[in-house]
Image: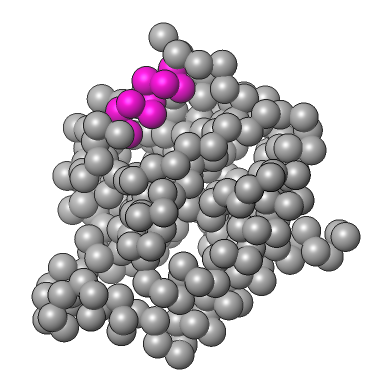
């Protein structure tokens, strides 16, 4: 049976993720050979992670920098595959859609996949707030076209399963500015003639409300909270992120 290492980044200055991570501990340890945490230095209660896996404390901030470090540290462990997933997403997935996650892991263990990109089902994508959903459609379309896909795929969920070969492509690519990894990683892997397999997953639904149950209840439920989450500032932020997703691709062309 093929082995899979989970690697993830943790930035939790308020300590609100830690109870959810601890809740998912046994589930995650059943599924993965090892868990590698790339942790920002301002994260609270870091010591609680020592019982869950291998902890690396980053020396500086940066999405591109710490995603790369997470893959590099996981690549140093002897395993067949590396599963990268953002910590809030993998915890939500494990706590709410365990059967789907377990089936995905078993499928990979029986496969010869070269690289897997986990995207959101239509329902899971539309569970997110409007500012995120709307602004991510154009970047997904641009990335799909760059790869030569005949239909649009979701590249922005922050969940990938690397073979050793695809992990090496990313490591050799080096550090990229912030969110540009989301476009550059899949395009670079495709350009290396590595076959990409897409998996649409229900468990990649909007996970942010997990951390704010009290606030969601106070405003009158998830629909109202979603509406409030798409204010002017959020739209501005998401438009900026959308540009970053594809900036290097469009600059190089």
In screen coordinates, is 181 left or right of 111?
Answer: right
Give the residue at the far front of this rendering.
150
Which quadrant would residue 110 be assigned to in this image? top left
| Residue at x-position 58% and y-position 71% | 241
User: Is residue 106 part of the magenta span, yes or no?
Assistant: yes
Q: Please, what is the dominant secondary structure of the magenta stretch?
A: helix
**Range of residues picked out in magenta:** 101-109
Q: Residue at x 41, y 9 (%)?
A: 1
In this picture, residue 102 sits left or right of residue 75:
left
Q: How many marks?
A: 0
Residue at the farthest bottom position? 232
Judged left or right of residue 11, residue 152 is: right
Q: On screen, 35 above or below 247?
A: above
Q: Position of residue 99 (x, y in %)?
A: 24, 32
Q: Position of residue 18 (x, y in %)?
A: 24, 54
Q: Residue furthest top?
A: 1
Q: Nearer the viewer, residue 161 or 68?
A: 161
């Amino acid at each position: 049976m093929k082995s899979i290492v989970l690697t993830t980044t943790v930035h939790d200055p308020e300590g609100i993720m830690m109870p959810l991570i601890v809740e998912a501990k046994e589930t995650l340890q059943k599924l993965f050979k090892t868990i590698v945490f790339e942790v920002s230095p301002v994260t609270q209660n870091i010591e609680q992670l020592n019982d869950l896996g291998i902890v690396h404390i980053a020396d500086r901030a940066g999405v591109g920098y710490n995603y790369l470090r997470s893959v590099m540290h996981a690549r140093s462990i002897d395993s067949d595959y590396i599963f990268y997933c953002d910590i809030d997403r993998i915890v939500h997935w494990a706590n709410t859609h365990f059967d789907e996650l377990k089936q995905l892991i078993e499928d990979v263990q029986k496969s010869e996949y070269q690289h897997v990109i986990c995207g959101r089902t239509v329902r899971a994508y539309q569970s997110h707030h409007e500012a995120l959903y709307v602004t991510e459609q154009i970047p997904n379309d641009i990335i799909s076209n760059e790869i030569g896909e005949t239909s649009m795929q979701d590249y922005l969920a922050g969940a990938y399963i690397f073979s050793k070969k695809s992990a090496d492509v990313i490591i050799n690519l080096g550090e990229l500015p912030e969110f540009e990894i989301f476009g550059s990683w899949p395009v670079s892997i495709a350009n290396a003639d590595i076959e990409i397999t897409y998996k649409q997953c229900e468990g990649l639904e909007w996970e942010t409300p997990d951390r704010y149950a009290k606030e969601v209840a106070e405003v009158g439920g998830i629909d109202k909270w979603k509406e409030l989450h798409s204010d002017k500032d959020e739209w501005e932020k998401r438009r900026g992120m959308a540009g970053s997703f594809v900036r290097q691709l469009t600059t190089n062309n």
